[in-house]
Amino acid sequence: MEASMRSFASDNNSGASPEIIAAIAEANRGHAIGYGDDPWTARAEELFRAEFGPASQAFLVFNGTGANVLALSLAARPGSSILCAEGAHLDVDEAGAPEAAGMKPLAVGSSHGKMLPEALEETLASLRGIHAARPAAVTISQPTELGTVYTAKEIGRIAEIAHGAGLALHMDGARIANAAVALGLPFRAFTADPGVDLLSFGGTKNGLLFGEAVVVLEPRYAEDAPYLRKTRLQLASKMRYIAAQYEVYLGQALWKRNAEVSNASAARLAARLASLPQVSLAHPVETNALFAGLPPAAADKLREKYFFYDWEGGLVRWMTSFDTTEADIEGFSRELAAALSAAGSAGAR
């Protein structure tokens, strides 16, 4: 893959923000005590408390899958089930990691990626006693795998159902910054306030080099977190390199600036697509993901210039990043129009 290549396949394909690289370089001076007993980690943890409330506790980890498994392990015993929306990343894209930790994902009906409260109630009512894995938690993705966003009220309703059944509510926030910008709300307003207990806080898709966090919002789940982080292989010895990134990301609101760019870029691209009748969007564009239907021949032609993924239902997925530029959108739109034209001409012969 060429260094000059621009991708609309995933925000994972973007680089890291220059501010993040600078923060890591600055943290690389001298020695520091390992395993989180360093000043960078202490400052990062304080920034998380400022965002999520004084009772919250943040545990820095390596990656998103590790964050999800660790967070849910705080609420679930081996043999438990985790209720998730259809198509949830936890269920279909984590290579059996929850199952390896003894947790069984159980899909619940959804619409545009969002779990339906009535479907959650029906699923809970249908579980067959000791013949079904005992539910321990409900997990939702914010934003969803389809780029849509739960409102704080919708999250509150799911929390009400989950807590009424004695279950924890976990949020997979791999792209939580994009959701916060879309909602125009601080993180706490759609996590701790409406009843989320456990949060996987992501930053890698929004400009970090690596490193996520598990944020325990309900204190009773925090006791085992330091120990399980080790047994779940997520305790970094040189944790200052993760923590230094969050000093900039949270402390200087880099999360917001980056997510504003990626969300706005997706909206601009969606506006361009509106002028192309051969292209249809399957879901609302609320963050930085677009799911489009277009002629397969046009998709194949466009792949000569751009890499992107097919999606179920005959769709393709395009994503913008914190470093997507107007020139990137212009070039992609131009190549898409040319691919559609070429596919139409071929079909007419």
Image (tube, rainbow, N blue to C red):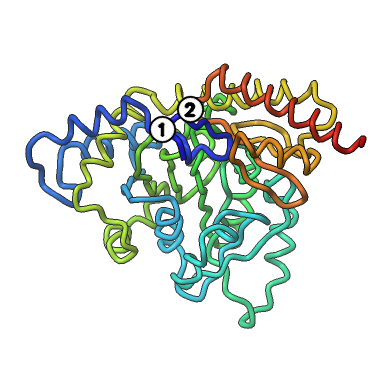
Q: Amino acid at mark 1?
A: Gly
Please give the residue where the numbered disc 2 appears in the rendered image: 322
Q: Determine the image quadrant of residue 24.
A: top left
Mark 1, residues whose alpha carbon is within 10 Å: few (<14), some, or many (≥20)? many
Query: Which residue is drawn at the image coordinates 10% and 43% (left, top)?
Result: 32
The extreme left residue here reads 30
Q: Is residue 146 above or below residue 71?
A: above
**161 to the left or right of 349:** left
Give the mark, 2 or 1, whose residue is nearer the N terminus.
1
Q: Position of residue 213 (x, y in %)?
A: 37, 46
Residue at position x 54%, y 40% in the image? 10
The crowd level at tag 2 (other Cα within 10 Å; few <14, some 14-19, many 20+) is: many
Tag shown at residue 78: none
Q: Is residue 146 above or below residue 161?
A: above
Residue 228 x, y percent position in the rendering:
32, 63
Which residue lies at the image location 71% right of the left edge and 64% below the top edge?
A: 123
Asked if disc 2 and disc 1 are in contact, CB closer than 8 Å, the reply is: yes
Residue on which disc 1 sits? 207
